[in-house]
Amino acid sequence: MNFVVLWLMFAFFFAGIGAYFVPKRYRNLGLDDTNSTTGAALSGFVAGPLVGLLWYYTPKLNRIWMISLTVLSFGVLYTMFARANPDNLCVVAPYNATYLTQQSVNGIVIGSIYALMAVGLTLIYSVQGIISFAHGQLYMIGGYFSYYFLDRMSAALTNAMGTEIIVNPIWGIPVAGILVFIIGVVFERLFLRPMHEGLIERAAEYAILITFGFGFFIEYLTLAVAGPFPIRATRYLETRRFQFDRISITDDITFGPVNVIADRGVVMVIGILLIFVLLYFLQRTWTGRALRATSMDKQAAAVTGINPITMNTLAFGIGAMLAGMAGAALVPIFSWVPYLGAEMAGRSYVIVVLGGLGSVPGALFGGLIVGIVEAVGAGCHPDASKGAAYKEAFALVIFALVLLLKPTGLFGREQL
Amino acid sequence: MFKALLQPIETRIDKSIGRQNLGYILLGFLVLYFLWFPQDSSQSNYAKTVFISGFFYAILASSWALLAGIAGQFSFGHMAFMGICAYVTGLIARDGIGFLGIEGASFPTLVAILIGTIVTGLVGLVIGWLLLRLRSSYLALFTIAFSELFRIVMLTEYDYTGGSNGLSLRRLVVTSDVDAARRIEYYIMFGLLVLSLALMYWISNSRIGMFLRAMREDEEAASSLGVNVVFYKIIIFVITGMIVGLAGSVFFSDVGSERVIPEQLEILQMSLVIAYAVIGGMESLLGAAAGAFISRYLLENLRQVSLPVTITFDGGVVGLMTLLILALAVGLVGAWAENHERIKAYKMRFRSGYIVAAIVIVLLGTNITNTPSTWNTGFWRFAVFGIIMVLTLRYMRNGLLYPILQWFSGRDADLQETVSIRNDSDDDTLAEDNA
C-alpha cells in the first residue's frame, strides 16, 4: 500500500512538472502546443522523470501519441490498483474480465440516458452560447410530470374500466417532454430573449445567474408542491433482468454471464431511439438544418431567411425537452426526490465538457465514457458502500482534469 | 409621481445636512441598534440566533458580491471554502495534528480556527491559480465540480468527518450561562461582519478595487494597461475564501448546532447565498449584506403566516388550467407547423385572451371564507424568493436595495458607476445590434 501511495505522489509530481514546463518549451520553440499540456501530464504520469525526453525532443503530439499515452496511463493505473488491492474482484484473474464487462455494460446502459441529457445541453450551448444551469431541475421536473401523469391516468382508467389498469411509464415520456418543452420555451421567451435582443449588458453573467435562479425556483416549487419525500413510478416490464450467458468475441475469448436489469435495458433502448430521432431531426429536416446553420453563423443564417431569435427559443425548448424526457425515462428506475437534479446536472456538465461544448458526437461519446467510468469506478472501489457514494465523484475528477488540461474537450468545436 | 413628491424633501435634506451625512447618521443608528439588541431582555435567544445567522449570511453574500459583482469571478465554490475551513477547524480541534497519523495534542478552538483560516487561504491560492485560464461559464462549472467533489468526500469519509451526521466542533464560547454565551456569540459575529465589510470596502475603494473592476469589464485590456491580472485574480480568491472560512468556522462552532454537516455545502445552499446577494445588489457590498440580512430575517419569520381569511382552491382549477395549457400548446405547435407569419397573428389574437381566461379560472376556483387561518409557508417562501430573484435579475439588475444606497450616496445625477451607465446605454446597444 505504501509503495503505491509513494508511487502516486511521484507520478502526480512529474505529471504536474510536465504539464507546467513542456507547453512553455513548445511555445518558446514556436511549435503547435494544442496537445502539449495533456500529453506532458500523461507522460509524466506514465514515465515519471522520462517526461524530460518529451521536453528535450518536442515531438509532434498527434492523435496516435495521445491515444497511446491514454491507454498506457490506464494500464499503469490498473497495474498499480491491482498491486494495492490484490483481492479485489476487478483484479482476480478468472473473474475480472466478466466482472469488468458486466460493469461496462451497466455503464453503457445508463450512459445512453446521460448522453441524451448532455445532447440537450450541448444543443442549447451551440445555438445560444450559454450553459443552462437549470438543466438538472428540468430533468427532475420531467420525472415528476411523468409520475403524476401516470398516477392520475391509472386512477382515472381504473375508475372508468372497473378493473385495475396500470399505465406503462413509457407513455409518461412524451407527456413530460411536451410539458417541459413548454416550460423551456416560456422561460426562454421571457428571460433569455431580451439578452439576444441586446437589452442586457454582460450577457454571459446574466445567463449564468438567470438560469441558475430559474433552477432554484423550480426546485423549491417542486418541493412545495410535491414534498421532499421520494416517489417511484411503476416499472416498465415484469421481467427483472435479461441474462446473456455467453458473450463470445472469438471461440477462445468469452465472457459471461452478463446481466442487464430489464428496466435499464428498456431505458437504454429509449435513449438510443430518442437520440436517433434527434439526429434525424437535426440532419434531415428543414428546422433541424436551420438550427445547425444558426449554431454555425447567426448572421449568415439570418441572411438565408432563418429567424435566429426563433431558433434560439426552439433550441432552448428542445434542450429542455430532452432533459425532461430523460427524467421521465428514469423515474421508474430511481427513487425520485426534488434534490436529485443537481447530481444529474453535474454529470451532464462533465459530459459536455469532456466531449467538447457544442459537439453532439462529443456528448454521445462523453455520455458513454462517463457511464462506464462511474460503473467501473464504483464497482472496483475496495469498499463497496463508499464506492457507491463516490460514483459521482469519479466523473467530477475527470471533469476537473479535462477543464485544467484540455478545456476544449475531445471534439471541441462550437457548432453542432 | 414619486419623484415629484420626493423633490422638496430631497432639496431640503441636501440644503441642511446633506444626503451622505444623513446616510452615515442612519447607519450609525443601525449599528447602535444592533449593538443594543442583545441587551434587550425581552428578546428571546431564538431572536438572537436569527440575527446571528443573518450576520453570517450577510458576510457570505457580501464576500460573494466582492468576488462576483466587483471582480467578475462567478464562483459557485463559496460554500466549499466555508466548509473547508469548518472541517479543518473541527479536525484540528479534535485530533490536533493527529488526523495526519502523527501523535499530537488537540488545539484550543481559537488556534484551530486560525489554522483553518490559513489553510483555506492556501486552498484559495491553489484554486485561484487553477482558475486563471477559465472564463465565466467554465469557471462556474469548475467551481461547481470542486464544491460537489468536496461535499461528496466529506459525506463519504465518515471515519474522519462523521459522514452525514456532520463533524462536531467545539464551542468557542464556553460558559454555563446560555444567555450570556448567546450574547457573546452575537457580538463576535457582528464584529466579524463589521470587520469584513470594512476590509472589503477598503479593497473595493482602493486601487485594487479599481483593478478588479477593470478586469471584470475586459481582462485583456486591463492586462495590457499594466494590471497584474494573475496576482489580483488569485488574491481575490484567497481573501474572500478566508473571510467566508473564518465566518463559517465561528458560526458552526457556536450557533450552527456546533457541527458542520455536508448538507450545508450543497449547491442549493450556495444558490441561497447568490439569491441574497442578487436581491440586495450584486455590485454593492453593503447592499448584498443588507439583502442577506433582510431576506434571512423574513424567511425565518414567515414560516407561518396568519391570514385574516381562509383561502381554498377548488380541485377543478388544476384540471382547467391543465386544459388551458394543453390548448395553448396544441395551438402553438399547430401554428408553428403551418408558418411563422401565422404564429404572430395567433399570438396577437390570443395572448390577452389566455391571460384573462387564466385569471377568471383562478378567481372562480377560489373560495374565501371569513375565518382566520394560519398558512404554513414551508417551501413556498423559497419558491417565491426564487421568483423575486429571477425578476430582480431581469428588471433591477443592480438589486432591490441599490437605488436606496445610490440615493444616499448623492451621486445619482452625475458621478455614477459603470452599472448605471450601462442602463442608460441600452438603446445604443440595441441600435448597434440591429445595425
Image (cartoon, coloured by chain):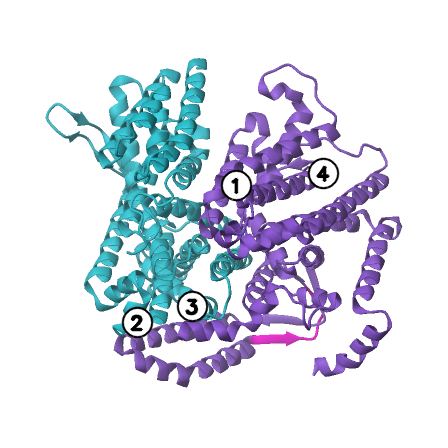
Q: Which chain is purple?
A: B
Q: What type of secondary structure mainly makes up the magenta span?
A: strand
**Vertical position of residue B367 compared to residue B190: above or below:** below
Per the model, the C-alpha gap separating discs 4 and 1 is 20 Å
* Part of the protein shown in magenta: B366-374
What colour is chain A? Answer: cyan
- Which amino acid lies under the numbered mark 2 shown in the image of this protein? Ala
Amino acid type at circle 3 is His
Which labelled disc corresponds to residue A302?
A: 2
For mark 4, what is the residue? B250
Q: Is mark 1 on a helix, strand or loop?
A: helix
Amino acid under disc 1: Ser
Cα separation between marks 3 and 1:
31 Å
What's the residue type where badge 4 is placed? Val
Residue placed under numbered mark 3 in the picture: A196
Q: Which residue is drawn at 17% across and 30% down?
A: A246
Image quarter of the C terminus of chain B: bottom left
